[in-house]
Amino acid sequence: MELKLEEGMKTAEKIVLGVSLASSVLLATWLLTGDRKVRTRDFVSKKAEGLRGALKSDRVQASEFDAYYI
């Protein structure tokens, strides 16, 4: 896989992009190692369950008898 950078990107923009990618990798590595791995997995799963519950409760159930005409 080849990452193609735009020809018009300035050197500073390329450096910022590289530093942000490197810091993201370091953060992911730190979060997913040792004891933090378990806590991170638990945190993400709890937030995902909360999001699923919120999405399900926001849906309006329409019956087949409800008709909306323009």
Image (cartoon, rainbow, N blue to C red):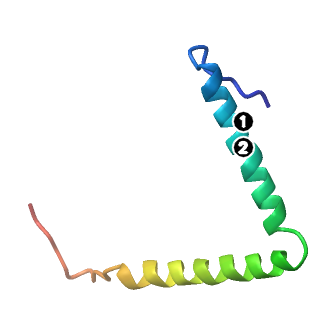
Q: In the displayed image of the protein, which residue is found farthest to the right?
A: 34
Query: At label 2, which amino acid type do we have?
Result: Leu
Q: Residue 27 bears which disc, if any?
A: none
The Cα–Cα distance between marks 1 and 2, rounded to whole angstroms, is 5 Å
Q: Quadrant of residue 20?
A: top right
Q: Residue at x 19, y 79 (%)?
A: 66
Residue shown at the point (80%, 54%) measured from the top left = 26
Instruction: Tell me which residue sits at (69%, 30%) in the image.
Output: 15
* The residue positioned farthest toward the top in the image shown: 7
Establish if 3 lies above or below 59. Answer: above
Image coordinates for residue 29, horizontal then vertical, percent: 83, 60
The disc label shown at residue 18, or none: 1
Q: Position of residue 35 (x, y in %)?
A: 87, 80
In the image, taking residue 57 as reference, residue 62 lies left or right, namely left
The mark total stands at: 2
Q: Is residue 23 left or right of residue 61?
A: right
What is the secondary structure assignment of the residue under circle 2? helix
Q: Nearer the viewer, residue 63 or 48?
A: 48
Between 68 and 5, which is closer to the camera in this rendering?
A: 5
Q: Is residue 8 left or right of residue 21?
A: left
Contact flag, marks 1 and 2 (Cβ < 8 Å): yes
Element type at mark 1: helix
| Residue 45: % across, % down | 67, 80
- Left or right, 51 with reference to 37: left
The residue sitting at 72% across, 35% down in the picture is 18
- Which residue carries the number 2 mark? 21
Establish if 1 lies above or below 32.
Answer: above
Q: Is residue 6 or residue 61 the one in the foreground? A: 6
Q: Quadrant of the N terminus?
A: top right
Q: Amino acid at mark 1?
A: Gly
Q: Quadrant of the C terminus?
A: bottom left
Mark 2 crowdedness (10 Å alpha carbons): few <14, some 14-19, many ≥20: few
